[in-house]
């Protein structure tokens, strides 16, 4: 069954603007940003998503954990960060359309933090805000069916993936399938859904903007609950996504290194054979000599396989 929501004029406008920005991202080769920017954005993502849930570690402490340095802080907070690092590094192995993969991700994210990591809750729960019950989640006996319906919608519905990713995020939060970790799973899984179609989302830290608008985030979730449909939440999340893309495009003086270009082209060409001319078509701002040096670097470092010689030379990623 399709979750309830309405495609409004605002949603269509936001989708069009996001599509334009993704086109701009592609034209300046930010689909897979330079390595240093990817690292910074991943740290921002982990910091913001966990800070929303009450984690107290700073950006500097999370950076230190990623660099395998000793950090002093609450054990639970450190474990949350380590788990988040592990699951985000594991994104390429997760299938956004698989419920089993979804549970596996939760198991990694909440390992050592809750007793039933990776398993659906077996009791009824309510979400308390202050002294009031803000949301009563569906009974545990309905969870398997509700999650099956949600994944069926994600796999089979014809709506745009930008919209479906927002709907999944909201509906998963509403269903509240796990005892804990539902919020961070909603944000993680929306990233995974989007990255499947638009690789830029793997390292786009829209969680930072959610953290900045945290009060509004929960307000929109609550209003959507009371209305019984996710339209308002879709609009909110599309606004967040648009602003995140604008922020990425506003970064000045981004220069790609040879390894950045090589990694980016791999995500485009995948396992197909290609020539230096094909490589140059994607990076029109570099010279033929620079393209040759890039490809020689890739071959020398075991990233690329070279076949043939002179005009018959072809390349293939290993």
Image (cartoon, rainbow, N blue to C red):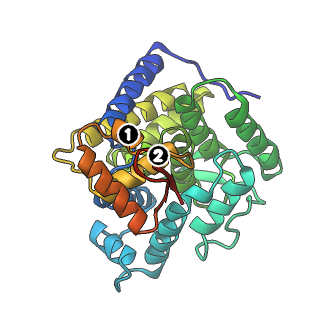
Whether residues under marks 1 and 2 lie with C-beta atoms below 8 angstroms apart, the answer is no
Is 241 in front, or is 229?
A: 241
Which of the numbered marks, if any, corresponds to residue 71? none
Residue at mark 1: 277
Which of the 4 image quadrants contains residue 152?
top right
The image quadrant of residue 30 is: top left
Q: Is residue 224 above or below residue 14?
A: below
Query: Is residue 111 placed above or below 23 in the rendered structure?
Result: below
Q: In the displayed image of the protein, which residue is found farthest to the top? A: 9
Q: Which residue is mark 2?
A: 312
Answer with the quarter of the image where residue 5 lies.
top right
Say above or below: 32 vs 50: above
Q: Residues within 10 Å of mark 1 (few under 14, many from 20)?
A: few
User: x, y percentage for residue 274?
Assistant: 48, 44
Helix, strand or loop under label 2: helix
What is the quadrant of the N terminus in the image? top right
Q: Residue at x 28, y 36 (%)?
A: 284
Instruction: State the CA–CA distance, disc 1 to disc 2.
Output: 11 Å
Residue at 50 percent of width and 15 percent of height: 8
* Residue at 63% across, 61% down: 106
Measured as percent of width and height from the top left, residue 255 is found at: 21, 50
Nearer to us in this view, 18 or 72? 18
Q: Earlier in the sequence, mark 1 or mark 2?
A: 1
């Amino acid at each position: 069954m399709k979750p309830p929501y309405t495609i409004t004029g605002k949603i269509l406008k936001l989708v069009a603007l996001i599509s334009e920005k993704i086109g701009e991202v592609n034209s300046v080769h930010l689909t897979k940003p330079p390595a240093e920017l990817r690292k910074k954005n991943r740290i921002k993502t982990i910091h913001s998503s966990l800070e929303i849930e009450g984690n107290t570690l700073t950006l500097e402490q999370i950076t230190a954990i990623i660099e395998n340095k000793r950090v002093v802080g609450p054990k639970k907070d450190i474990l949350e960060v380590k788990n988040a690092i592990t699951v985000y590094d594991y994104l390429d192995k997760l299938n956004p359309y698989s419920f089993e993969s979804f549970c596996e991700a939760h198991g990694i994210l909440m390992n050592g933090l809750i007793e039933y990591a990776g398993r659906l809750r077996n009791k009824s729960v309510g979400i308390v805000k202050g002294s009031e019950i803000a949301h009563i989640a569906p009974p545990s006996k309905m969870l398997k069916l509700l999650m099956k319906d949600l994944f069926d919608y994600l796999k089979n519905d014809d709506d745009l993936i930008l919209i479906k990713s927002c709907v999944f995020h909201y509906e998963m939060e509403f269903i509240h399938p796990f005892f804990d970790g539902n919020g961070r799973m909603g944000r993680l899984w929306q990233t995974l859904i989007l990255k499947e179609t638009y690789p830029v989302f793997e390292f786009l830290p829209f969680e930072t903007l959610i953290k900045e608008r945290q009060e509004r985030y929960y307000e929109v979730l609550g209003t959507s609950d009371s209305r019984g449909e996710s339209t308002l939440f879709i609009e909110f999340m599309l606004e967040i996504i648009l602003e995140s893309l604008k922020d990425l495009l506003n970064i000045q003086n981004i220069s790609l290194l040879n390894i950045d270009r090589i990694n980016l082209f791999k995500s485009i060409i995948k396992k197909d054979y290609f020539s230096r001319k094909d490589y140059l078509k994607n990076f029109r701002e570099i010279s033929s000599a620079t393209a040759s040096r890039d490809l020689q670097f890739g071959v020398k470092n075991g990233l690329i396989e070279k076949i043939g010689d002179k005009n018959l030379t072809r390349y293939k990623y290993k």
